[in-house]
């Protein structure tokens, strides 16, 4: 028996992981594929691809919410109901499949667009009927955010098994016929799917928070790199941007990109102008607004519970606010420096070398530069002198 963990957000990498796990299970001649769920939800498009993979494979797919205390909300519930066999561990929860979005005040509000909501309802009901499960409960998962624990889901006919661990589950389903196969799973050895390094990296980058942070770090690194060429920040910024784009599957909000790029340009312009923070403030506002738009909390692209959406929004916005405070302090210091009266203490007390005879004027070598010098006494070429004062481009010197 091959098992695969879908224990985080459903992202583009989840599709690749499940696809490769199905291929490996077929190659191994496994009885079935065990998909262990513990997820807050994820991308609707990615979830639809997972449902298609389950539908098309001849291999029985068993979805199991495990371990105890786990949840399979939103997209996870859709995967569970669409599986060939559905099981839960005690003290696990499914449901909360109603799409929601963040409100302007930071709370959440349900999506009341009947076109999209009815489409999801029809899909989840049809999946439930196909597998002989409770279509009414499936509909209420979406329409009223119904949540069920393992015992309730079993009594309402949403799942087929409640088992404390995978071994007990395999013993309980032994002898069942699924997809024209009679399962022989009692005592079967469970082998967990180990993704190759490419899929592991994609899975890491596909986390919406990680990919979003990489995008923000890359943008700010580019700002520093453009402002201070030659320190390598540009290369680091481009690398972070590339990794962030890979993680998002290149599905980028064009409006958010425009705002962030505009904000970058305004901040760079502030660093090279005398607007006393006006351009920097405008740039920061653009970047914060773009960051909020970048947070994957929209619908139908993303299908997360409200609490997870709020966490993602905070993850995207907080770095921008921290950078904003930094830029505000930097702009304040720059403004102080620009308004301060010029002050030049000069190189008084430093030593120089006479390049020629100073009588009373000549030239000295100071810090690798040639300076005109004046002395009250004759100084021969090659002698060391001490700088007394600086008047414009003339150094007043005396013998050491």
Image (spheres, rainbow, N blue to C red):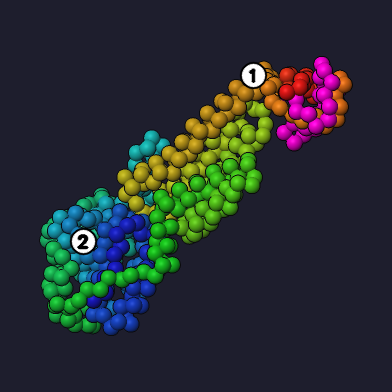
- In the image, residue 204 sits, relative to residue 217, either above or below, namely below
Which is more toward the observer, 121 or 372? 372
Q: Which residue is mark 2?
A: 66
Packing grade of label 2 (10 A; few <14, some 14-19, many >=20) is many
- Name the quadrant of the C terminus: top right
Of labels 1 and 2, the one closer to you: 1
- In the image, residue 165 sits, relative to residue 360, either above or below, namely below
Q: Is residue 267 magenta?
A: no
Image point (58%, 33%), residue name: 280
Q: In which image quadrant can residue 227 be found?
A: top right
Q: Is residue 327 left or right of residue 128?
A: right
Camera sees residue 112: no
Q: In which image quadrant can residue 123 be found?
A: bottom left
Distance between the alpha carbons at the discs numbered 1 and 2: 65 Å
| Precedes in sequence: disc 1 or disc 2 | 2
How many numbered marks are there? Answer: 2
Camera sees residue 138: yes
Q: Magenta residues, as a range?
A: 361-386
Which is more toward the observer, 360 or 183? 360
Q: Secondary structure at mark 2?
A: loop
Residue 340 numbered mark, or none: 1
Image point (34%, 51%), residue name: 304
- Name the quadrant of the N terminus: bottom left
Q: Position of residue 338 (x, y in %)?
A: 65, 23
Question: Which secondary structure dominates the residues rendered in magenta?
Answer: strand
Image point (22%, 82%), residue name: 181
Q: Position of residue 77 (x, y in %)?
A: 27, 59
């Amino acid at each position: 028996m091959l098992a695969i963990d879908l224990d985080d957000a459903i992202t583009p990498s989840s599709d690749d992981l499940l696809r490769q796990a199905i291929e490996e299970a077929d190659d191994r001649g496994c009885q079935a594929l065990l998909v262990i769920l513990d997820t807050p939800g994820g991308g609707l498009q990615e979830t639809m691809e997972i449902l298609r993979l389950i539908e098309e494979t001849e291999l029985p797919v068993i979805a199991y919410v495990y371990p105890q205390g786990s949840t399979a909300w939103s997209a996870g519930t859709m995967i569970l109901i669409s599986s060939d066999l559905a099981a839960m561990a005690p003290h696990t929860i499914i449901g909360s499949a109603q799409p929601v979005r963040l409100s302007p005040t930071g709370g959440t509000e349900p999506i009341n667009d009947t076109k999209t909501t009815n489409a999801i309802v029809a899909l989840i009901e049809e999946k439930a009927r196909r597998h002989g499960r409770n279509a009414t409960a499936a509909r209420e998962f979406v329409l009223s955010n119904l949540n069920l624990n393992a015992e309730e889901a079993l009594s309402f006919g949403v799942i087929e098994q409640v088992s404390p661990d995978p071994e007990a589950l395999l013993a309980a389903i032994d002898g069942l016929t699924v997809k024209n196969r009679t399962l022989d799973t009692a005592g079967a050895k469970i082998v967990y799917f180990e993704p190759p390094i490419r899929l592991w990296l994609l899975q890491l980058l596909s986390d919406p928070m990680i990919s979003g942070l990489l995008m923000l770090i890359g943008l700010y690194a580019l700002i520093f790199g453009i402002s201070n060429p030659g320190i390598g920040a540009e290369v680091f910024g481009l690398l972070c941007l590339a990794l962030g784009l890979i993680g998002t599957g290149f599905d980028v909000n064009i409006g958010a990109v425009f705002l962030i790029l505009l904000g970058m340009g305004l901040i760079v312009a502030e660093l090279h102008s005398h607007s006393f923070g006006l351009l920097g403030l405008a740039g920061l506002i653009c970047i914060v607004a773009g960051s909020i738009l970048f947070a994957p909390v929209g619908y139908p692209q993303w299908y997360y519970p409200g609490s997870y959406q709020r966490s993602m929004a905070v993850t995207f916005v907080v770095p921008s606010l921290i950078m904003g405070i930094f830029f505000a302090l930097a702009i304040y210091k720059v403004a102080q420096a620009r308004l301060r009266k010029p002050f030049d203490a000069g190189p008084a007390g430093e030593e120089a070398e006479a390049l020629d005879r100073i009588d009373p004027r000549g030239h000295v070598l100071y810090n690798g530069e040639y300076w005109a010098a004046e002395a009250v006494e004759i100084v021969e070429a090659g002698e060391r002198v001490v700088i007394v004062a600086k008047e414009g481009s003339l150094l007043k010197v005396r013998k050491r």
